[in-house]
Image: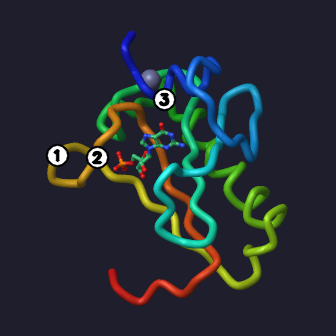
Amino acid sequence: MDCLFCKIIAGEIPSTKVYEDDAVYAFRDINPQAPEHIVLVPKTHMDSANDITEDNISNVTAIWRAIPKIAKELHFAENGYRVINNCGEDGGQTVNHLHFHLLGGRKFTDF
Ligand code: 5GP
Ligand code: ZN
């Protein structure tokens, strides 16, 4: 499948990895919107949040298990952070492999 994030997970496109387990790969965003901007993806491809089902929601659980671990490891857990999922065209999704943005290191004022 011609998917940018599948290629990053496979190591075919280089990335700066910050975390990995059986289900999750997390790496630094190439165009960071905050001092800390990490993208978390399930290793199993799904296009977007619209593809989450009872059968694959364990991948999302794994991502949420990783989020506070990464925030603590990178020392911004205590100050706080923002997690964003963009879904589909109106949501502003540009890469069609489900992913969550973990943003930290600054205060987010706008919604
Ligand atoms: P979306 O807009 O789909 O929610 O987020 C896609 C994100 O992927 C964007 O923040 C964009 O900067 C990031 N991105 C796109 N291509 C690459 C890449 O080749 N490497 C990395 N590390 N991030 C990428
Ligand atoms: Zn993919």
Q: Is mark 2 within 8 Å of ligand 1?
A: yes
Q: Dot 1: within a 10 Å radius of its alpha carbon, few (fewer than 14), some, or many (20 or more) residues? A: few
Q: Pinpoint residue 44: horizontal percent, then vertical percent.
A: 54, 21
Quarter where residue 26 is shown: top right
At 74% from the left and 47% from the top, the residue drawn is 18
Residue type for callout 3: Phe
Q: Nearer the viewer, residue 54 or 97?
A: 97
At 68% from the left and 42% from the top, the residue drawn is 16
Q: Which mark is residue 89?
A: 1
Residue type for callout 2: Gln
Q: Is residue 46 left or right of residue 37?
A: left
Q: Which residue is mark 2?
A: 93
Q: Pinpoint residue 86: horizontal percent, then vertical percent.
A: 33, 52
At 37% from the left and 14% from the top, the residue drawn is 2
Residue type for callout 1: Glu
Q: In what quadrant does ligand 2 lie?
A: top left
Q: Which residue is mark 3?
A: 5
User: At numbered mark 3, what does the secondary structure look like: helix, strand or loop?
Assistant: helix
Q: Nearer the viewer, residue 92 or 60?
A: 92
At 76% from the left and 81% from the top, the residue drawn is 78
